[in-house]
């Protein structure tokens, strides 16, 4: 039952649309963990080891008062009190940590919301209006001091991790349109202090580089202006206290659930407080809101860890597994998705030169290795012989597959595997039947050039007719073929983001409508085909975020599959995302990107740290290669749940030129652990460092079993968790040289 508390005048807000779609399903069934103290006017949300508190100050603003480790039930958070101005050049509105500040009344730092009214007024001052307790948290309504603009702030908190979800619904109840020029999901505030900012950047084939730098006065902007998430920066951040490291100390972290252009601003003000504002990118943004219309912001997920960056990432992984990833494969007895099937992808073996006979031959070799899923990549449709033509024409190429896809799919099923297919639904080649028929369907400014990249243009998915076309052909493809998996690719960023169907003042809505329609297509496909799984791929990691992960089961972190490069890419990736979704392929050596030669065992173990796939040309493998891969795939199947859903510990980071790298995962029951160790290049006869393991039950006995490689000759085969954590795991003296790898499992006896 909902409890409603009103301020001076109650204005009921309708249920949020986008925010509701992003609300974790498991949270809806939770009992409320929110409390409002009417005497102090403080709201408090408690879950796991976290408390988040904010209140109504004497001016009527919402003011954050605490975010950190969980307070006692009888503890009273600070009273919300407007901060004084430091000098006449300051503003109390700037110094006061508002929960969701409108741009007005002397607000000089980053606003959460900026609007222009029809009469030219741009002053927006938001005060508390009312609030409602929800099953998972709170809805708090703010209203401008004189204009009929309402903002409903949505709060929900996860009982297992203490991760908070925040978003906003902006509603225009004026008699004329308003233009939203900036809209954030939330603003978060940390008290004055010395902090280090962690964030992820990169480029194609070099994604997910972890950056660490001191937070200084001024603003640090992380963003994408590309229409999509982008390889260059990822919408995740972590802020650690001065005494924090990988395993210890306080860390505040967040991830924006949005797959379009985004911006996160981290600023330290003149009084040393740190504010984080994250949401739609205001660059080239102008969303016209007509009377009685609403705009939903994305959700910002934010959490707190008292156990360093490693603790923060483990909380995020657990939250993503339980609350973000699609629930179609979850059951009441298993609230997390099943581990990903081990896949074979045909791209490196055949590229565009696919055929029924050639794919069947590859499928037979893949099945013999113990593969679960066979995926045919690009080249099966339209007049697709190179990347110059065919995108948009989603019919089966009759020359390559004269009897359609059914004979291939039937053979794959007979071999004990399910079947997957590559698609790139949002793109079109100018050399295609679709473009010749509908040249107006692409993002463009009439009369201006249409910039091609990879010989393709971007379909304007914001258009209802384009949205219907994409949903229609995908639905038809899945209805006519027994397909278990779509590898959904997206191989360029936007250019000329025009939408001339709308009036000129409203065309910038394309940044929101495109992504909303993308989500709606994915949601509808999952509804119509609940057993079909989908991968988000964008030339690698160009569209990896918690928005797309509400609708997709896995992602492709990078086109760079070099096993040594992948150690660093995967290290950065797992600070923000669970290994469950991290597809990691074993491909050919020497690698196509940097010509590095590595052993098959090294390549296999590098990929086995995530969700394993084989992408090599297995036609060229020797019998010894096939036997090794088959053995390691079987070993991986036995421990995969621990690897992809267990607690991850980074024992040795591959970053900063390290000679060594090591990871460990421990399952929730602490009954199994898996350890991976890698050598880049040992120097001067050095051996591998002693690995002091983590997360085990100190009183339990664990048996050590090599998956690949050997422990030191004098290592015990069984010892206590205390031994493995305090004494450590020693690797064999022979484990040295260039590009070596080893892996072990520990099982509680």
Image: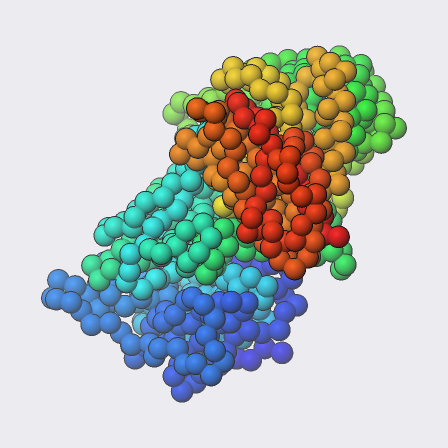
Q: Is residue 61 above or below residue 308?
A: below
Question: Where is residue 33 shown, x and y percent of the image?
Answer: 55, 73
User: What color scheme is it?
Assistant: rainbow
Instruction: Kindly identify the residue that appears in the image at 47 percent across and 53 percent down.
Output: 247
Give the left or right position of residue 629, taking residue 160 as reference. Answer: right
Q: Is residue 699 visible?
A: yes
Question: Where is residue 18 shown, x and y percent of the image?
Answer: 54, 55
Closer to the camera, 375 or 62? 375
Q: Is residue 392 visible?
A: no
Q: Is residue 378 above or below residue 251?
A: above
Closer to the camera, 657 or 185? 657
Quarter of the image containing the N terminus? Answer: bottom right
Question: Where is residue 352 shown, x and y percent of the image?
Answer: 65, 15
Q: How many tags in the picture? A: 0
Give the left or right position of residue 651, taking residue 497 as reference. Answer: right
Question: Where is residue 608 shown, x and y percent of the image?
Answer: 64, 35
Q: Residue furthest bottom?
A: 39
Q: Residue furthest left?
A: 88
Instruction: Kindly identify the residue that appears in the image at 22 percent across and 69 percent down.
Output: 92
Q: Residue furthest right?
A: 414
Q: Quadrant of residue 15?
A: bottom right
Closer to the camera, 416 or 393? 416
Instruction: Kindly identify the residue that appears in the image at 60 percent across and 14 percent down.
Output: 386
Instruction: Kindly identify the residue that appears in the image at 41 percent across and 59 percent down.
Output: 250
Give the left or right position of residue 731, taking residue 623 as reference. Answer: left
Q: Is residue 725 above or below residue 539?
A: below
Give the left or right position of residue 36, taking residue 195 as reference. Answer: right
């Amino acid at each position: 039952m909902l409890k409603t508390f009103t301020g001076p005048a109650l204005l009921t807000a309708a249920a949020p649309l986008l925010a509701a779609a992003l609300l974790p399903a498991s949270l809806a069934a939770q009992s409320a963990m929110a409390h409002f103290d009417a005497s102090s006017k403080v709201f408090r949300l408690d879950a796991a080891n976290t408390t988040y508190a904010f209140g109504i100050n004497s001016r009527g603003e919402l003011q954050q008062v605490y975010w950190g480790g969980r307070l006692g039930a009888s503890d009273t958070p600070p009273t919300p009190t407007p901060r004084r101005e430091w000098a006449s050049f300051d503003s109390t509105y700037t110094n006061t940590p508002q929960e969701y500040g409108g741009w007005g009344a002397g607000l000089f730092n980053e606003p959460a919301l900026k609007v222009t009214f029809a009469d030219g007024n741009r002053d927006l001052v938001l005060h508390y209006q009312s609030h409602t307790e929800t099953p998972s948290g709170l809805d708090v309504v703010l209203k401008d001091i004189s204009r009929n603009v309402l903002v409903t702030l949505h709060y929900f908190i996860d009982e297992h991790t203490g991760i908070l979800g925040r978003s906003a619904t902006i509603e225009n109840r004026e008699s004329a349109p308003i233009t939203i020029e900036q809209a954030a999901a939330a603003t978060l505030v940390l008290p004055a202090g010395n902090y280090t900012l962690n964030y992820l950047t990169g480029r194609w084939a070099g994604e997910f580089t972890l950056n660490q730098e001191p937070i200084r006065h001024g603003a640090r902007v992380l963003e994408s202006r590309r229409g999509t998430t982008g390889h260059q920066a990822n919408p995740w951040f972590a802020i650690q206290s001065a005494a924090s490291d990988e395993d210890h100390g306080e860390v505040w972290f967040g991830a924006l659930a949005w797959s379009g252009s985004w911006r996160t601003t981290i600023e330290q003000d003149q009084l040393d407080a740190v504010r984080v504002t994250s949401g739609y990118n205001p660059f080239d943004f102008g969303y016209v809101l007509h009377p009685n219309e609403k705009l939903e912001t994305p959700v910002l997920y934010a959490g707190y860890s008292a156990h360093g960056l490693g603790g923060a990432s483990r909380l995020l992984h657990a939250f993503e597994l339980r609350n973000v990833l699609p629930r179609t494969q979850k059951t009441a007895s298993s609230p997390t998705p099943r581990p990903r099937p081990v896949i074979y992808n045909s791209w490196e073996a055949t590229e565009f030169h696919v055929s029924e006979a050639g794919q069947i031959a590859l499928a037979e070799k893949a099945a013999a290795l113990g593969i679960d899923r066979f995926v045919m990549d690009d080249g099966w449709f339209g007049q697709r012989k190179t990347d110059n033509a065919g995108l948009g024409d989603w019919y089966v190429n009759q020359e390559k597959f004269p009897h359609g896809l059914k004979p291939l799919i039937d053979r794959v099923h007979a071999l004990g595997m399910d079947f997957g297919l590559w698609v790139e639904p949002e793109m079109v080649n100018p050399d295609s039947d679709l473009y010749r028929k509908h040249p107006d369907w692409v993002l463009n400014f009439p009369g201006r050039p249409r910039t091609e990249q990879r010989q393709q243009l971007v379909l304007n998915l914001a258009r209802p007719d384009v949205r219907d076309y994409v949903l229609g052909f995908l639905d038809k493809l899945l209805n006519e073929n027994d397909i278990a998996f779509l590898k959904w690719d997206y191989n360029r960023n936007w250019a000329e983001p025009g939408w001339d169907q709308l009036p000129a003042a409203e065309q910038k809505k394309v940044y929101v409508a495109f992504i909303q329609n993308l989500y709606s297509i994915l949601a509808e496909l999952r509804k119509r085909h609940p057993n079909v799984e989908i991968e988000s791929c964008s030339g690698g990691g160009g569209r990896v975020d918690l928005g797309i992960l509400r609708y997709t089961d896995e992602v492709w972190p990078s086109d760079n599959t070099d096993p040594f490069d992948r150690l660093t890419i995967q290290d950065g990736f797992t600070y923000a995302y669970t290994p469950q979704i991290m597809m990691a392929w074993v491909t050919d050596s020497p690698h196509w990107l940097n010509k590095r030669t590595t052993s098959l065992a090294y390549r296999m173990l590098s990929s086995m740290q995530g969700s394993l796939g084989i992408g090599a040309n297995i036609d060229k493998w020797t019998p010894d290669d096939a036997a090794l891969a088959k053995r390691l795939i079987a070993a991986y199947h036995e421990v995969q749940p621990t690897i992809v859903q267990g607690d991850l510990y980074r024992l040795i980071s591959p970053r900063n030129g390290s000679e060594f790298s090591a990871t460990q995962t421990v399952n929730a029951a602490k009954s199994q652990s898996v350890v991976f160790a890698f050598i880049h290049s040992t120097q001067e006869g050095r051996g591998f460092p002693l690995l002091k393991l983590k997360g085990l039950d100190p009183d339990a006995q664990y048996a050590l079993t090599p998956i690949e490689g050997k422990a030191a000759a004098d290592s015990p085969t069984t010892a206590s968790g205390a031994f493995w954590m305090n004494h450590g795991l020693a690797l064999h003296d022979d484990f040295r040289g260039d590009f070596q790898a080893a892996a072990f499992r520990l099982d509680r006896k």
